[in-house]
C-alpha cells in the first residue's frame, strides 16, 4: 500500500493556476469559469517531465494528452525498451482523498481485466518526488472521438466491428463485477492493423466501480458521475446501476458512429436529457436517409436504448452480436466485402478470446493429491464471440448477380435472333445458342451418368458371381441329363452338331 498520507500534507499548500480552453486566459486557483466566454477552466500543470525518468524505470519522451485527473506522457522502459503511456496525477489533487481514491481505483480495476480489447496496466506507484503515476499499454492510434470528428460517420460494417469489440471488452469487465460508468468515444481507442481492420482498446476505468454492494463507495449516494451526453437514464437520476447502464452508453456511441448524429434530439443539453428519460431514440432513416437501414437494426437500438433497464438486452455481448448481425443484412458494398474478408482472416487466426472467467473454470489438482493420477482437464469448448462475417450473407450477395446475368444473356440472345443474318448481333445470338446447347447436353450427360451409377450394383465383383448362377439354373431346366458343370459347354456344342447333320426319315 502506497504511503500517500505524507504526500497529502506535502502538497496541501501547492498553488496552481487555471486556464480557459477556448481563449487561453489564465486565472488563479479560486476562479472556476472564464470571465470572457464562461467556459469551465482547466488546471495548468507547469511541470515538464519530458526527458526525465519517472519511477526509476520510465524515460518520458513526449506529452500526448491531458485529462481532468492529470497528464499523459509517452515513455519508454529503460531496460525493456517497451513504450508505455504514463498518466501522472496532478499534484494539486493529491490533497483530495476522493480524487486519490479514484486514481488508485483505476489501477486496481483495469489490472484485474485480462482482455485483448482493454488497455493493460503495467505499473502503478509513487516517485521520490511525490509524483503518483500509472503506467499502461500505449495504443498507437487515436480516440474514436477524433475519428468521428474527422469522418463524421463510419462505414456500418466498420462501426459494428468497433462496437462489438468494445462490447466484448465490457463483457469481460462485467463478468468480474466491474462497471465502467464512463463509456464515450474519448475512452474507445482505435488503431489500424496491417490488414486494414481496426483493433479497439478500452481505457479510463477511473470512475468504474464494483457491482458488489459491500465494496467501498467513492461516489456519494444520489450523485451522478460520468459524461452527461452518454449517461443512461438511471445514471442521470443517481439510481443503482447494473451492467445494462454500460450497454445504454455503448448504444449511444454506436448510434453516433453509424449515423454521425445523436440518438436523441440535441437542441439543448436539457432537452436531450429529458428525451432520454421519457422517449425512444430517433429513427435511423430520419438522421441518415442515404442508406437503407434494416428494420432489425432499428429494433436493436430501440431495445438497447430503452428507458427501463428491464427492456434492454440481458448482456452487453448479446447487444454487440445482434448489432453486427443486423448490419450484415444491409446491401453489400465493395468496402464491406473487403473488410469482412480481412476480418474473417483475423478471426480464423484468433478464434477464441480467453477471459478471466474462462481461466477460472479450468480445474487444477487439489493440494496433496497425486498429480500423476489426475486426468488433464478438458479444454473449454471453442466459442466464437461473434459469427464469421465472411460467410454471413454470401449467398444473399451473389444470387442477385446470377439472376441479373441470366436475364441479360436471354435479352441479348432474343435481340440478336431478331436481326438479319450476317449481322454481328445475329452471330452473337447464334454463339449464345451454341453455348446453351452444349451446356444442356453436358448437364444431360451428367444427369444420365448419375442415374446410371445409381442403378448399378454396389460392387464390381457381385455382378459376375450372380450372372453365372442364373445361366446354370436355366441350363439345368432345359437339359435334365447333362454332364457335370465342367462339361456343359461341350455337351451343348455336340448336341447342336447332331441336330444339324441328322437327315429326317423319308
Image (cartoon, grey):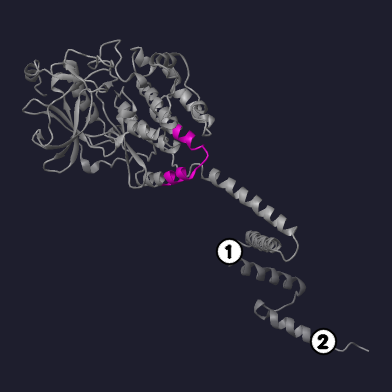
Task: Name the image quarter holding residue 316.
Answer: top left
Instruction: Give, as a single range, the part of the protein colored magenta.
Output: 323-341
Q: Let me know if residue 331 is in the magenta part.
A: yes
Q: Residues within 10 Å of mark 1 (few under 14, many from 20)?
A: few
Residues tagged 2 and 1 counted as in contact (Cβ below 8 A): no
In the image, 475 versus 26, the foreground residue is: 26
Residue 293: give x, y in percent of width and height.
Answer: 52, 32
328 to 47, vertically: above or below: below
Which of the numbered marks, if any, corresponds to residue 64?
A: none
Task: Write down the residue under mark 1.
Answer: 459
Residue 68: give x, y in percent of width and height.
Answer: 22, 22
**Whole-number angstrom distance, CA of label 2 to CA of label 1:** 42 Å
In the image, 140 versus 324, the foreground residue is: 140
352 to 244, vertically: above or below: below
Left or right of 498 in this view: 301: left
Q: Residue at x 32, y 20 (%)?
A: 227
Task: Write down the residue under mark 2.
Answer: 500
Q: Let me know if residue 445 is in the magenta part.
A: no
Point out the image quarter for the C terminus: bottom right
Residue 164: give x, y in percent of width and height.
Answer: 39, 34
- Going from N to C along the chain, the mark reached first, 2 or 1, is 1
Q: Residue at x 13, y 35 (%)?
A: 50
Task: Name the image quarter holding residue 51.
Answer: top left
The answer, for residue 240, to whether it is visible in the render is yes
Q: Residues within 10 Å of mark 2 (few under 14, many from 20)?
A: few
Amino acid at each position: 500500500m502506497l504511503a500517500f498520507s505524507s504526500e497529502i500534507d506535502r502538497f496541501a499548500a501547492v498553488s496552481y493556476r487555471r486556464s480557459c480552453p477556448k481563449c487561453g486566459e489564465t486565472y488563479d486557483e479560486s476562479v472556476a469559469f472564464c470571465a470572457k466566454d464562461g467556459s469551465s477552466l482547466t488546471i495548468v500543470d507547469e511541470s515538464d517531465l519530458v526527458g526525465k525518468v519517472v519511477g526509476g524505470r520510465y524515460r518520458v519522451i513526449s506529452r500526448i494528452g491531458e485529462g481532468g485527473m492529470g497528464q499523459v506522457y509517452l515513455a519508454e522502459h529503460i531496460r525493456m525498451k517497451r513504450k508505455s503511456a504514463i498518466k501522472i496525477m496532478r499534484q494539486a489533487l493529491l490533497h483530495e482523498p476522493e480524487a486519490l481514491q479514484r486514481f488508485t481505483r483505476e489501477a486496481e480495476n483495469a489490472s484485474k481485466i485480462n482482455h485483448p480489447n482493454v488497455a493493460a496496466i503495467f505499473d502503478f506507484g509513487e516517485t521520490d518526488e511525490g509524483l503518483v503515476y500509472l503506467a499502461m499499454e500505449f495504443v498507437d492510434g487515436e480516440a474514436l472521438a477524433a475519428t468521428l470528428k474527422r469522418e463524421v460517420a463510419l462505414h456500418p460494417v466498420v462501426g459494428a466491428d468497433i462496437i462489438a469489440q468494445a462490447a466484448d471488452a465490457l463483457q469481460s469487465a462485467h463478468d468480474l463485477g466491474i462497471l465502467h460508468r464512463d463509456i464515450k468515444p474519448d475512452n474507445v481507442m482505435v488503431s489500424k492493423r496491417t490488414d486494414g481492420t481496426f483493433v479497439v482498446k478500452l481505457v479510463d476505468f477511473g470512475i468504474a466501480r464494483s457491482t458488489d454492494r459491500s465494496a467501498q463507495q467513492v461516489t456519494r449516494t444520489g450523485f451522478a458521475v460520468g459524461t452527461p451526453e452518454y449517461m443512461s437514464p438511471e445514471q442521470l437520476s443517481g439510481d443503482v446501476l447494473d451492467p445494462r447502464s454500460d450497454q445504454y452508453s455503448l448504444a449511444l456511441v454506436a448510434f453516433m458512429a453509424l449515423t454521425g448524429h445523436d440518438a436523441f434530439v440535441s437542441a439543448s443539453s436539457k432537452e436531450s436529457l429529458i428525451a432520454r428519460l421519457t422517449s425512444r431514440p430517433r429513427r435511423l432513416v430520419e438522421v441518415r436517409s442515404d442508406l437503407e437501414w434494416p428494420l432489425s437494426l432499428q429494433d436493436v437500438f430501440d431495445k438497447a436504448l430503452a428507458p427501463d433497464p428491464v427492456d434492454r438486452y440481458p448482456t452487453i455481448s448479446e447487444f454487440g452480436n445482434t448489432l453486427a448481425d443486423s448490419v450484415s443484412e444491409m446491401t453489400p458494398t465493395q468496402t464491406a466485402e473487403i473488410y469482412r474478408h480481412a476480418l474473417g482472416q483475423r478471426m480464423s487466426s484468433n478464434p477464441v478470446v480467453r477471459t478471466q472467467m474462462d481461466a477460472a473454470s479450468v480445474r487444477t489438482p487439489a493440494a496433496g493429491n497425486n498429480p500423476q493420477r489426475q486426468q488433464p482437464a478438458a479444454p473449454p469448448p471453442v466459442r466464437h464471440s461473434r459469427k464469421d462475417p465472411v460467410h454471413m450473407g454470401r449467398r444473399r450477395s451473389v444470387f442477385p448477380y446470377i439472376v441479373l446475368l441470366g436475364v441479360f444473356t436471354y435479352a441479348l440472345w432474343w435481340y440478336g435472333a431478331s436481326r438479319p443474318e450476317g449481322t454481328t448481333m445475329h452471330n452473337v445470338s447464334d454463339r449464345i445458342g451454341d453455348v446453351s446447347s452444349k451446356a444442356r447436353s453436358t448437364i444431360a450427360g451428367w444427369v444420365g451418368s448419375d442415374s446410371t451409377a445409381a442403378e448399378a450394383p454396389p460392387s464390381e465383383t457381385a455382378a459376375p458371381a450372380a450372372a453365372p448362377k442364373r445361366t446354370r439354373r436355366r441350363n439345368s431346366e432345359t437339359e435334365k441329363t447333362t454332364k457335370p458343370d465342367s462339361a456343359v459347354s461341350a455337351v451343348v456344342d455336340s448336341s447342336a452338331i447332331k441336330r444339324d447333320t441328322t437327315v429326317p426319315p423319308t
